[in-house]
């Protein structure tokens, strides 16, 4: 058991090293930070001095090891743009992104599961057909377009919800939250829907197909034959059996919700790490870009690791076969 | 009777208070990079600093120089290399300390220190001296008649405050340094910084002890500044009434803003010219006739009409109209003449055309990439097969500047409002400290020495003649193909009375409500 965990852990570290290498290489060779840092009036001599100061003249492998050694100590240097430490910058932006990601994940799971069950139970009804066909929109329309459409409808035309920003934020010292003020909650609605729509559709379709599958099983027929109410059949016998795959997928999707928040955050001027990253790209702010990529890579690897390991605990069959292979 | 008077006085005060208690919610695409006023030489950064800090003299909303912390200035009669500035009396910083000549000496030296991005603008300054508590002399190396043009973005800080907070030098953004002044301010300006979250929200409140209280309208009591990057969201925020003024209305949304009953659009020429540069040393563009052919093959009117939707001011010279040296004759752009262009190509021996790459930014100027696309089509008509290479500015500028590009787009703003600024960067031979944005290979020793002579010529008439001569050379050499001057569009609430500032820098003490 320990061996399996170590094995998985070792794989995760390898993946992270690789992500670090890619993030280092791409950003080392894309764009020129000197250009962004110097004003248009800078002379050639000043440029050369800056290149030297930033260590851009060292051999590449030295720059990479330097990068790795600093990364493990959370030292990503200072942002070229804001001149603040990158770790501090990311820490101050993370609450916004995590609150948005969490809200949209909750939205996606609740609505996705509910509508999935509804459409599975009421096959062929008008509402089902409407939900199913309109859910295609959620999958096929690009995020920024959905965001702009929502802004147009709910902010400009109806004037119900704010079009940008996080509203009033309460500072708890180590965390800033929009959950505690009315404007903060209102501001959360449109970005959360925009970000969660795709995942909601996915979860709904998954729930529906799993539900249809389960409803064909013998034990459901038996339950019905025993005279249980429909409600009891659906919610106490069918639902628990479909939740495991749904939660697995939902968990894995959380990583991509954090990663895809970039577009939503840009559209809604949401002050999270995604917006930070986009600004860093415009400015070729290499320390911020590398740190963000590592962060997202780390989030994905961590979630995968947890999901992977949890399989062994949940499903004894997997555990046995793995042990047999090793033996 | 007395009671009556008191009541009416109370009513007057109350109504006055409500009329003047006005918050302006202001949005633009980008945020200021730092609150340290000498660390960056960049538009949005200066704009925010201008609300909090003052300069000795400033440009008003029409672009004219007006007194600010200095009330009078002149070069000394007996020594033209010394400018004497009389400082305004009774000015205090936001923390209450008095403003005097010590602060000016300190601030200008700070702006010339290592790490300052403002130091090039003061490169001619030899020494700054306090004559008495409210008089300052600035001595330059040789007379510099245009020194005051370089002082409109030189912000004044408090010496004591800076020393107490260890910010006596600007933080070097390039070296990733940061200091107390990055997030904290103490200026003499019309507004006091209340809170700031970078890229999120900055709140300023009116300075109750502002020296210009009786000089300007000062009707704004609070500014809430939010950068909104997505242009669709920015316009939506204006349309839904969540912000009151936005500085950059995208051209495709001009109609929507101006047709809204609650909003208005203010439009004015910007101090920024857009043009193409050509390699004058290598390849077919080294031929003058080819460059001339390309110049008249560009249909500036149709770029204005189709690409810019009328929002541009076509020009025949790489100089916005605000700049000293600008004339109607230079500004007149050549007639679009395909036949003549073709015959010039033939004379140059290129009647079968050639291949060329056009390097273009796609996130810097208004519709930059679309202008380049239009140029590709126009060049095809005279047989030049142009491949468009559009990149974000961070990648584009090194290419445009490095000298490898044969054909590239550039925009140039002129903060000093003087031709010398254009010549020094775009016309002078590329050396280690001049001509850094002249990768065309154009090099003319005679022009170079004329450009350098401008820096110390005190006879303004003679200086203007030299400027005209240099422009004649530039126009003859045709290493640049001017396109147009950009037009600024500010969208705002209908009851706001505010002029569009040619440097795109609103000064909110000038804002009035109707």
Image (cartoon, rainbow, N blue to C red):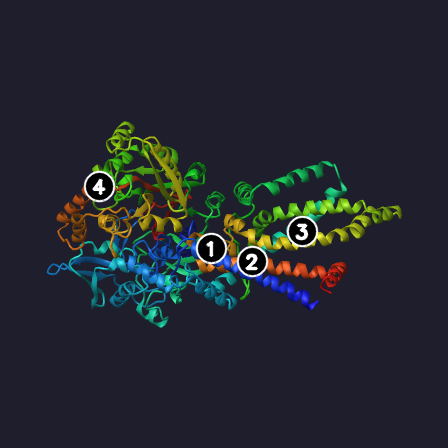
Q: CA distance from mark 4 to mark 3?
A: 67 Å
Residue under numbered circle 3: A109
Q: Residues within 10 Å of mark 2 (few under 14, many from 20)?
A: many
Tell which circle, 3 or 1, labels the residue nearer the N-terminal end: 1
Q: State the image quarter where residue B37 is shown.
A: bottom left
Same subunit: marks 4 and 1: no
Apparent side of residue B144 relative to residue B405 in the rendered image (left or right)? left
Chain identifier of the residue bearing label 1 in the image = A
Tag shown at residue B477: 4
Same subunit: marks 3 and 1: yes
Residue under numbered circle 2: A297
Tell which circle, 1 or 2, labels the residue nearer the N-terminal end: 1
Q: CA distance from mark 1 to mark 2?
A: 15 Å
Tell which circle, 2 or 3, labels the residue nearer the N-terminal end: 3
Q: CA distance from mark 4 to mark 1?
A: 41 Å
Front in this rendered view, residue A211 or A113: A211
| Image coordinates for residue A290, horizontal then vertical, percent | 48, 59
| Image coordinates for residue A6, horizontal then vertical, percent | 65, 66
Q: State the image quarter where residue A159 is shown.
A: top right
Q: Are marks 4 and 3 in contact (CB under 8 Å)?
A: no
Q: Are marks 3 and 1 in contact (CB under 8 Å)?
A: no
Q: Residues within 10 Å of mark 3 (few under 14, many from 20)?
A: many
Q: State the image quarter where residue B293 is shown.
A: top left
Apparent side of residue A192 relative to residue B478 in the rendered image (left or right)? right
The quadrant of the image that shows the C terminus of chain B is top left
Residue under numbered circle 1: A26
């Amino acid at each position: 058991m320990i061996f399996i965990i170590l094995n998985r852990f070792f794989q995760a570290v390898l993946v992270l090293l690789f992500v670090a290498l890619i993030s280092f290489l791409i950003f080392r060779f894309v764009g020129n930070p000197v250009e962004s840092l110097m004003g248009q009036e800078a002379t050639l001599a000043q440029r050369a001095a800056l290149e030297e100061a930033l260590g851009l003249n060292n051999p590449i492998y030295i720059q990479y090891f330097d990068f790795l050694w600093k990364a493990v100590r959370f030292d990503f240097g200072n942002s070229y743009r804001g001149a603040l430490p990158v770790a501090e910058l990311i820490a101050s932006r993370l609450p916004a992104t995590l609150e948005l990601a969490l809200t949209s994940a909750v939205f996606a799971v609740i609505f996705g599961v509910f509508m999935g069950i509804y459409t599975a139970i009421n096959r062929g009804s008008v509402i089902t057909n409407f939900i199913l066909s309109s859910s295609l929109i959620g999958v096929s329309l690009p995020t920024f377009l959905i965001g702009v459409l929502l802004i147009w409808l709910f902010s400009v035309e109806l004037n119900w919800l704010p079009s940008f920003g996080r509203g009033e934020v309460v500072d708890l010292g180590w965390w800033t939250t929009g959950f505690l003020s009315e404007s903060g909650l209102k501001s959360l609605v449109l970005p959360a829907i925009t970000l969660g729509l795709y995942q909601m559709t996915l979860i709904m379709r998954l729930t529906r197909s799993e539900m249809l599958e389960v409803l064909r099983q013998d034990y459901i027929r038996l339950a019905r034959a025993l005279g249980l109410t429909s409600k009891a059949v659906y919610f106490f016998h069918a639902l628990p059996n479909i939740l495991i795959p749904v939660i697995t997928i939902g968990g894995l999707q959380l990583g991509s919700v954090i990663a895809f928040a970039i577009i939503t955050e840009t559209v809604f001027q949401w002050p999270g790490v995604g917006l930070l990253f986009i600004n860093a790209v415009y400015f070729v702010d290499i320390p911020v870009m590398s740190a963000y990529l590592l962060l997202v890579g780390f989030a994905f690897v961590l979630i995968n690791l947890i999901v992977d390991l949890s399989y062994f605990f949940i499903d004894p069959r997997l555990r046995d076969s793995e042990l047999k292979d090793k033996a | 009777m007395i009671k009556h008077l008191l009541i009416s006085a109370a009513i007057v005060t109350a109504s006055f208070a409500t009329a003047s208690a006005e918050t302006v919610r202001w949005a633009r695409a980008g945020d200021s990079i730092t609150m340290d006023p000498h660390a960056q030489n960049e538009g949005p950064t200066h704009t925010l600093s201008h609300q909090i800090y003052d300069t000795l003299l400033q440009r008003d909303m029409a672009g004219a120089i007006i007194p600010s912390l200095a009330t009078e200035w002149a070069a000394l009669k007996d020594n033209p290399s010394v400018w004497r500035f009389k400082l305004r009396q009774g000015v205090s910083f936001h923390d209450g300390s008095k403003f005097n000549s010590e602060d000016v000496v300190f601030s200008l030296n700070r702006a010339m220190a290592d790490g300052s991005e403002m130091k090039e603008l003061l490169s001619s300054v030899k020494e700054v001296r306090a004559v008495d508590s409210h008089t300052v002399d600035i001595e330059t190396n040789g007379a510099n008649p245009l020194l005051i043009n370089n002082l409109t973005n030189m912000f004044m800080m408090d010496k004591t405050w800076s020393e107490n907070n260890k910010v006596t030098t600007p933080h070097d953004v390039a070296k990733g340094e940061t200091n107390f002044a990055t997030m904290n301010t103490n200026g003499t300006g019309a507004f006091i910084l209340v809170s700031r979250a970078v890229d999120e929200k900055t709140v300023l409140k009116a300075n109750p002890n502002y020296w210009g209280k009786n000089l300007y309208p000062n009707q704004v009591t609070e500014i809430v500044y939010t950068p909104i990057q997505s242009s669709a969201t920015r316009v939506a925020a204006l349309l839904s009434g969540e912000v009151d003024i936005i500085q950059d209305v995208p051209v495709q949304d001009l109609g929507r803003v101006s047709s809204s009953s609650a909003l208005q659009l203010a439009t004015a020429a910007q101090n920024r010219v857009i043009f193409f540069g050509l390699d004058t040393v290598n390849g077919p563009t080294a031929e003058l006739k080819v460059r001339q052919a390309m110049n008249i093959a560009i249909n500036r009117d149709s770029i204005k009409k189709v690409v810019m939707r009328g929002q541009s001011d076509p020009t025949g010279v790489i100089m916005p109209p605000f700049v000293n040296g600008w004339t109607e004759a230079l500004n007149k752009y050549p007639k679009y003449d395909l036949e003549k262009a073709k015959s010039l190509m033939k004379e140059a021996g290129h009647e079968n055309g050639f291949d060329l790459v056009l390097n273009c930014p796609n996130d810097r100027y208004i519709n930059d990439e679309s202008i380049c696309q239009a140029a590709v089509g126009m060049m095809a008509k005279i047989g030049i097969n142009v491949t468009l290479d559009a990149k974000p500015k961070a990648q584009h500028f090194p290419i445009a500047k490095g000298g490898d590009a044969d054909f590239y787009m550039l925009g140039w703003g002129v903060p000093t409002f003087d031709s010398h600024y254009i010549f020094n960067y775009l016309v002078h031979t590329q050396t280690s400290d001049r001509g850094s944005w002249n990768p065309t290979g154009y090099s003319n020793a005679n022009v170079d020495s004329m450009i350098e002579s401008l820096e110390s010529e005190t006879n303004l008439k003679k200086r203007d003649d030299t400027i005209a001569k240099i422009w004649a050379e530039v126009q003859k050499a045709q290493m640049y193909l001017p396109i147009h001057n950009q037009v600024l569009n500010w969208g705002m609430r209908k009851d706001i009375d505010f002029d569009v500032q040619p440097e795109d820098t609103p000064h909110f003490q000038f804002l009035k409500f109707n």
